Image (cartoon, rainbow, N blue to C red):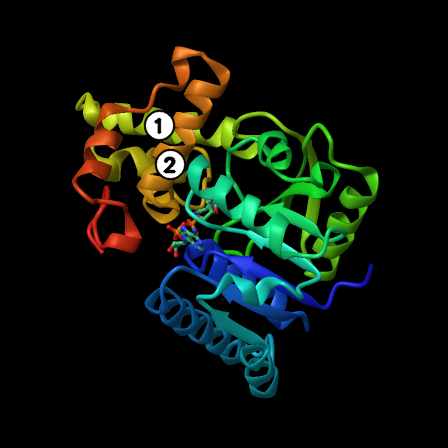
Amino acid sequence: MSIQRVGIVGAGTMGNGIAHVFARCGFDVVLCDVDQRFLDRALGTITKNLDREAGKNKITVADKDSALARIQPATDRGKLANCDFVVEAATEKFEIKTEIFRDLDRLTRPEIILASNTSSISITKLAAITKRPDKVIGMHFFNPVPVMKLVEVIRGLATSQETFDSVRDLSLKLEKTPVEVNDAPGFVSNRVLMPLLNEAMYAVMEGIATPEAVDEVFKLGMAHPMGPLTLADFIGLDVCLDIMRVMHSGLGDPKYRPCPLLIKMVDAGWLGRKSGRGFYKY
Ligand SMILES: NC(=O)c1ccc[n+]([C@@H]2O[C@H](COP(=O)([O-])OP(=O)(O)OC[C@H]3O[C@@H](n4cnc5c(N)ncnc54)[C@H](O)[C@@H]3O)[C@@H](O)[C@H]2O)c1
């Protein structure tokens, strides 16, 4: 089935990046969130990021204008009814995603694929909520979406080969590199990355080093482009906590226990870069 009109649910850090990439690659986008102010913020960010690409001559000013014109913001999820593909990028909470998938299954044509950008939640469980488990799949983009090349494509237990092939081809059309993984808490990327970030937080909590020192160790000693605490702030500390909790409960191993300092910071509303304060001040 040809895909032209794409629905995106959630217009936060990831949703706005996903909308940017689809629109820049010629797709029509319906970008959905629960409140107009989140949509306004997302369109502001997309405009700024497209401007940056035009400034670097990666796209023309006309490309930027036509990409923006292809994005239709919506608080009414009913506008997704005539989409040919939907990717969910809402808050990393199972109850929120459950409600969205149930609604998308009711709203959209039965043959269309419903993808989730979840970082850790079971694709198999999300699929089981719908009447089309063979058409549910993980399409895990990386932050910042317009820059990062990887899409982790996650097969749920019931995901069909046809669905997988469509999402692989779609990722290539977005000029991304798809990598196939199977469904398990945290998939591959976060199963390996999050314990590193969590352990870096323990090092700070236990007074072993400052956030700056921990980050320097990884930048200078391991050639990481960004230290683990800067990266955690960039991802969002609430997102990191949600992912650790999914892995802790899903894998049942105490080694995934979220760092108490992370829990405390999220309780304080210190969510990293997006809230102006995390391990660093912004
Ligand atoms: N932040 C990252 O680096 C990153 C990377 C890869 C994947 N993800 C995943 O992407 C998803 C979104 O993360 P984010 O960082 O963009 O979060 P975010 O907090 O920046 O944005 C989430 C958005 O979802 C919206 N939302 C919440 N409930 C909704 C609903 N019922 N309907 C429509 N919109 C709703 C919120 O209003 C918010 O705008 C999560 O599943 C997360 O795990 C995040």
**Residue beneath label 1, please?**
198
Residue at 62% x, 65% y: name it. 22
**Residue beneath label 2, please?**
240
Residue at 55% x, 59% y: name it. 8
Residue 203 picture location, percent across and down: 26, 24
Give the mark, 2 or 1, whose residue is nearer the N terminus.
1
Q: Quadrant of residue 93?
A: top left
Vertical relation: 187 (above or below) 104 = above
* Relative side of 35 to 204, left or right: right
Vertical relation: 240 (above or below) 37 = above
Q: CA distance from mark 2 to mark 1?
A: 8 Å
Q: Quadrant of residue 175?
A: bottom right
Vertical relation: 65 (above or below) 182 = below
Residue 82 picture location, percent across and down: 67, 66
Q: Which mark is residue 19?
A: none
Residue at 51% x, 27% y: name it. 192
* Closer to us: 10 or 127: 127
Vertical relation: 187 (above or below) 148 = above
The amino acid type, in three-letter code, at marker 2 is Cys
Asked whether the beta carbons under mark 2 and mark 1 sit within 8 Å of each other, the answer is yes
Q: Secondary structure at mark 1?
A: helix
* Closer to us: 74 or 211: 74
